Structures are given as C-alpha cells and as structure tokens.
Amino acid sequence: MYKFIFTFLVTSIAWNARAELLEYKFEDWSGVSLPTYVAKPNKISATTRLIVVMHGRKRNAEEYRDQWAKASQELNLVVIVPEFSEKNFPEVWGFNYGNIKTKNLEPIPKELHAFSAIEPLASHALKKFKIKSNNWGIYGHGAGAHFVHRYVLHHPEASHTLAIAANLGWYLSMTSQNWPFGLNNSNIDNEKLKQAFSKYFLLMLGKADTSTKPNSPYVADHWEIINSQGEHRLARGRNFFKSAVAKSKEVDQFFKWGMVEVPTTKGHSNTEQMVPFAAEMFYARLK
C-alpha cells in the first residue's frame, strides 16, 4: 500500500513538472497566418520570460518546441516557435534570408518580410500569456540561426534583450561582397551596424560542428563563396566574429556581442548540445 502511494506521488510530481505544450495561429501581422507552437511553465509568475525560437531548415517548429520543453519548465520560460512553411517562405530566400528579396533579388514589401513577423509575434505573446516583463529573447539553430543573425543586422532597432544564433552554415559577412554574402546591396549602412553592435548578441558554436561537405543543393551551388568564409561551420563562425570585432572598431562602436564555443560531440545536433546552454544564457540575461 505504502509503495503504491509513494509511486503515485512521484509520478504525479513528475507529471506536474512538465511544461504545458500548446499550439495557436498567429495572425496579427500583414503576412500569412503562422502556426505557433508553445512550451510554457505550469504557472506564469513575475519572473517568467519569453523566448522566440526559430526552427531549422526542415521547418519543424513542433520538434523545436519539444526540444525546449524541459528548459521551459525548469527555467520558467515561455517558448514560442512560429512555423515558416516552405510553401509561403520558399528556400533560403524565404526563410534563412528573412524573405526580404526573391530568388531573383527583387525586393519584397517590408510588411511581408519574415523578419517583420517577429516584433508583433513577441508583443502578442507577452500579452497573451500575461508575462510581466518586456525582456524577451530570440534563438535560432542552423537555418534558424541564419535568420537570427540577419535579423540582428537588418533590424537593429528590434526590442529583444538578447539574440542567440547557434551553428549557422555561413554568414552575412562584414565585407563588400554582394548580399546575401556581404554588405553590398544589403541596405545595412554603418549606422545600422553601430546600432546592431550595441545590442546583446551571442554567437554559439559547437566545437564538433566541423563537417567540410555541403549539406544541401543550395550550399553545393554556392560552395566556393561559402567555403571562402572558412572550411566548416566552426571556422566560419570564428572568422565572422573576428571580422565583426574589427568592423565595430572601424565604425567606432562599443561592442556588446559575444561568442562561446560549446564542447559538443555530435556534429550539428541541437537538442542535447546547444539548447541547455542557450536556455541558461537567456535565464541569466533576461532577469
């Protein structure tokens, strides 16, 4: 009898400790409705904070939400993951690059940029879940990290408190190369760079993310220019950060960016290797 009661209590406590998993449609912007997946603590308190998570190139928002469920409960975070479908935001142009230009480099109206969904998405979530602080963060891994680091550069006026990009494949580099690989024709001038450098941004690199082979047809087609940024993701991240430090000195701006190398062992994996570190960073910064 006592054994049964003890087992029941332990099971009940474990169940109650799980994050709540929800889904809703976000429609309060000019673009298409975005399925949005949520992991939230059982109780919203004064210390609850919001994280917007960008999924990877598989457009697997629900899976990314599930990867953050444990951190959501343990660190009191509401995590929302909007899904940018291949149909509505095709290829790297529609998602990684923020849907600001077509594949033919024709400009897309600003209100339809994927980037333009983020601020109203966060504002809506802060109200929807009655979060008492306006401190919020944005995180992306892989293709989602492409999105985040470009969002930081194209929208330095955004209201997030901390942005984290983990293990992206290549960069919008601090060079005069043509966009999307460099600043030429990017509409990012020195004033925007100064504003971007003045916001908290963390580049997370996995020490085991060292594949030297293209992982998609797009990467294969542009391998020469991507490989010129470094032989693998780890090297390209190190080189990008070094060039950003130099650029901040060139434009005379105090630099609030940081870079960490996570002691990973499983290549490009996100769940076990990057999420716990990122969650701790948000917990510390968003207080």
Image: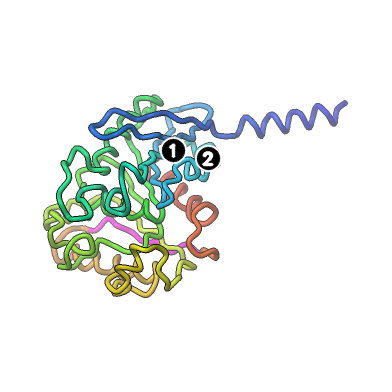
Q: Amino acid at mark 1?
A: Val
Percent x, y of residue 241: 30, 65
Q: What kind of residue is marked 2? A: Ala
Q: Residue at x 45, y 70 (%)?
A: 210
The answer to whether residue 257 is magenta is yes
Q: Residues within 10 Å of mark 1 (few under 14, many from 20)?
A: many
- The majority secondary structure of the magenta stretch comes to strand
Q: Is residue 282 left or right of residue 1?
A: left
Residue appearing at x 22%, y 39% in the figure = 112
Closer to us: 28 or 214: 214
| Element carrying mark 1 | strand
Q: Which residues are magenta?
A: 255-263
Res 33 seen here: yes
What residue is shown at x 15% (from left), y 67% (from top)?
Answer: 176
Is residue 219 highlighted in magenta? no
Residue topped by disc 2: 69
Give the CA distance from mark 2 to mark 1: 8 Å
Is residue 287 shown to the viewer in this render? no
Residue 245 position within the rendered picture, expressed as x and y whole percent measured from the top left = 24, 65
Q: Nearer the viewer, residue 227 or 263?
A: 227
Quadrant containing the N terminus is top right
Q: Please say if the residues under marks 2 and 1 sit with CB atoms less than 8 Å apart.
A: yes
Residue 252 appears left or right of 142: left
Q: Is residue 53 above or below residue 36?
A: below
Q: Position of residue 161 (x, y in %)?
A: 31, 43
Disc 1 target residue: 79
Colouring scheme, one of rainbow, by chain, secondary structure, one colour: rainbow
